[in-house]
Amino acid sequence: AVRAHALQNSAFERGSLGKQPSNPSEAAGSSAEANKRARILAACSTKGNMERCLSLGERARLDNLWARASFACNIHFNVFDQPEFRDAINETAKLGASYKPPPRQRIAGKLLEDNYKSCVVEQGNRLVFDNAMLLGQTFMSDGWTDMNKVPILNFCVSTNQRDALVDIEHCLDAPTKDAEYIADSLERGFQALVAAMVASGHELKAAEQSVVQVLTDGAAACQIGRDLFAGKHPWMITGWCSLHVISLFFGDVFKRVQLYSRTYDRLHSLIKYMRSHEKTVLTFNKLRSGKEGVRALGLPGPTRMAGKYSMIADGHKQKDVIQATFTNPTVSAWGGKLRGLDKGYYESAKSTAFDTALWLDVETVTTRLADYFMLLRLADGSTPAMGKIYGRMLELDAAFTAREDDADEEEKQVHAFFQSRWEQLSSPLHCAGYALDPEFFGRKQVNNQEVMDGLKEVCNKWLTAEEAGKAHNQWLQIVTKQGIFGQERTFEEAKEMSATNFYLHHSSVMPELAKVAQRVLSQPIAVGICERVWSNYAWIEGKLRGKMLPEKSKMLVMIYIALRLKRSAESGMWEPDSLEWASAHTFDDWLAIAEEEAEAFVAEQEAEAAAALREAQEKAATPTPDALLSSPPPAQPLTTPAVKKTR
């Protein structure tokens, strides 16, 4: 098409169109040229032939123009793979050259407001809300400060399938962020969530009661404010962000245990020195190329406590490359030319790199904290892990108990910090999740009073007294392997499906318990969505948009996250993942433990009945004050010693 247009224009410029030929030979030539032009235009009239004409050179020219636009406008390469971007290009190509893109003012004004209304207000998180009505959702909030030093709060919800951003609030009036302010902010965010769900077609009361958990970070004001907010909504259960609590555990270890703090400080100084000098960092990167598992030199952020362990674990793998860097001829020659303080710093770093005691400490720290770090990785994932985090913590506690006699004082300090943070993290939902997850049915939960209390509290919050009693009996049928739960097929099915699907599959035989279990096991254990919102916010706002008004930046972030949610649903990335079982129980082990649990449950019931009978007898034997005044003096006890009765 472009070639035909150019040929036609050149003909006009030469004057060959609209001009009568002067002689027959010229007329014959002009006729042949006109026929040629007609054949070109006819060939370009179909889509296939048009693409064939473009492929002769125009396609390469247009590709180059798009690439140049990407380089000049600093467009990220992955933008060209986004379906919205390609849809805009394809629809523009259909209209042809008559269409002109909208100006900047219209995109930043009316079109931005229209898309915010359609993507966020009208459609928004409808898919997430529909799922929340069945399985419940967790309401969470987190704070941040943008590049203009403006405090911001976000309010998010999470289900077993996807996370969603509800609202963003800019604190422009410089408030005192105490517990009362946080409680009021949570209430405003909750009301925004309920209003959005009602606008999506859900009933008011059902929308309110779909929120089963409230999560914040571990700050003291957040904890008090969260409890004040949940006090107004008695069906909600509050909790700490598991990721934040485990990170605080790493902060305790690297700050207060001498071995770990000393190892971190020495390795941190060495890596910081190497990163600060061109010779060492370039030589290190050259030597590490081709070595699997050896990452680049990195330092943790000031608030990333678990990043300290990551640096030490990476340093354990980087040991040989670090030492080879200081023995490299280029680095040795550079170090030999240094003078004064620079020479002293170089020699100190080199001696640290070859210090055997340092690397022994690095290996010790890496080995001892490896399982705790995997616990952090579990909390950082997006897959629902309610119950599994409690089970992993019990496994760590049991592993330490088995080796406690051989543990040194510093290892005991680490475990003491772990237990302290575990008590802080534990909540009724975690306990109920541990009791309800099929992976842990062989862990004798009936002997764990904390777990049983958590399960009872959750059932009492969400069910009537009659339904709670039925749910408890149904749970006992599972853990004691009665009926179909004593079949090997049921055991194998439970290993291959998610915990929520297990209860959905058997909801006909245990409707009350399935209602509670699906809600418990669908909830997240961390506020990862809140952290990801801040990452998107920082990427969208950026330094080039530092002067953008807060309301406009809020609309951009919420549109971006809403479109990502829609894209993930349309692409089929919507089904929840399920974590594999970490325990190695066989079906025979399952049945053996079931018999032990049944015996333990019977013994517990007998003990409770005996205690209740004993309390009633003591109450009946205790005389009232009036009876004491009117009764005769008590008889003297016999001198014969009483015989101790045995059962």
Image (cartoon, rainbow, N blue to C red):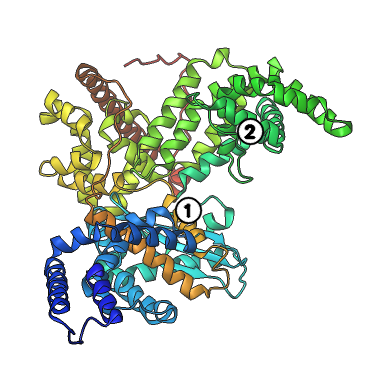
Question: Residue 594's mark?
Answer: none
In the shown orientation, is residue 211 left or right of residue 487?
right
Secondary element at image label 2: helix
| Above or below 535: residue 620 | above
Q: Which is in the foreground here, disc 2 or disc 1?
A: 2
Q: Amino acid at mark 1?
A: Glu
- Whether the residues at callouts 2 and 1 have beta carbons within 8 Å, the answer is no
Q: Nearer the viewer, residue 75 or 30?
A: 30
Return the residue nearer the eye: 180 or 115: 115
Q: Secondary structure at mark 1?
A: helix
Q: How many marks?
A: 2
Placement of the C terminus among the 4 image quadrants: top left
552 or 219, nearer to the observer: 552
Q: Residue at x 14, y 25 (%)?
A: 486
Residue that appears at 48% across and 35% down: 633
> Looking at the rendered structure, which numbered label has been put on residue 531?
1
The answer to whether residue 126 is left or right of residue 639 is left
Q: Pinpoint residue 13: horizontal percent, then vertical percent.
A: 30, 80
Three-letter amino acid code at the position of disc 2: Leu
Query: Residue at label 2?
Result: 282
Badge 1: how crowded within 10 Å, few (<14), some, or many (20+)? some
Q: Quadrant of residue 357?
A: top right
Res 415 seen here: no
Q: Quadrant of the N terminus?
A: bottom left
Mark with earlier residue (2, 1)? 2
Using residue 436 as the reference point, say whether residue 504 is left or right of it.
left
Residue beneath the point at 36% across and 16% down:
645
Q: Residue furthest right?
A: 340
Q: Position of residue 580 (x, y in %)?
A: 29, 31
